[in-house]
Amino acid sequence: GSIFAVGDCNYGCLGAPPNWEMPPVPKISYPGEEQALHAVNNLKRMAKGSKTLKPTWWPWGAGMFATSLGPHDACFVLAANHEKGSGYMVNWWIPAALQKEIIETTKINECKNGCIGILIWHFVHHTPVHLWGKGPLIP
């Protein structure tokens, strides 16, 4: 049989340093959701009798972090990857805390089948062009 692990329960990478097939993926919600989609697509392929699995990749959104630093403080890092020191802190303090609150609120709204959350997160998960990460530019 086959085993698929996504999110926090997976090893987070393929291969060994420094010759990664896929470098460690941050254990945050967005990459976990993307990994789950890859696993589901491969389960569907297997259910149809295919022995060839679609490869996974380092999700483009894995390099975005909204980190809480207290009730009214946060920072937002964009374009990070597996290399130390990568990424840019583009937002901090109260604006980043508000951004984190909007992310959490709309994500919960999406999970409850709310119109606003579904509209916002559909475009996050269906981004037509991936500008960073290790996946294809146009998936």
Image: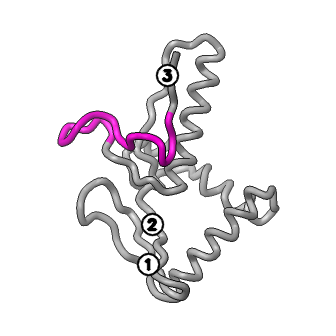
| Label 1 residue SS | strand
Looking at marks 3 and 1 on the same chain, the residue that comes earlier in the sequence is marked by: 3
Residue 65 x %, y %: 45, 66
What span is colored magenta in the figure? 5-22
User: At 71% across and 63% down in the image, what residue appears?
Assistant: 108
The image quarter in which residue 69 lies: bottom left
Q: Which residue is mark 1?
A: 75
- Cβ atoms at labels 1 and 2 below 8 Å apart: yes
Compute the Cα span from label 3 to label 2. 29 Å
Residue 126 x %, y %: 61, 49
Residue 106 x %, y %: 69, 67
Q: Which residue is mark 2?
A: 65
- Cβ atoms at labels 3 and 2 below 8 Å apart: no
User: Of 10 and 47, which appears nearest the observer?
Assistant: 10
Q: Which residue is mark 3?
A: 53
The local crowd at label 1, few if under 14, some if 14 to 19, many if 20 or more residues have their Cα within 10 Å, is many
Of the residues tagged 3 and 1, which is closer to the observer? 1
Mark number, residue 21: none
Q: Is residue 120 above or below residue 96?
A: above
User: At 63% across and 69% down in the image, what residue appears?
Assistant: 104
| Label 3 residue SS | loop
Q: Is residue 15 magenta?
A: yes
The local crowd at label 3, few if under 14, some if 14 to 19, many if 20 or more residues have their Cα within 10 Å, is some
Q: Residue furthest left?
A: 18
Q: Is residue 135 above or below residue 127?
A: above
Is 55 placed left or right of 43 in the picture? Answer: left
The image quarter in which residue 114 lies: bottom right
Q: Amino acid at mark 3?
A: Leu
Q: Amino acid at mark 1?
A: Cys
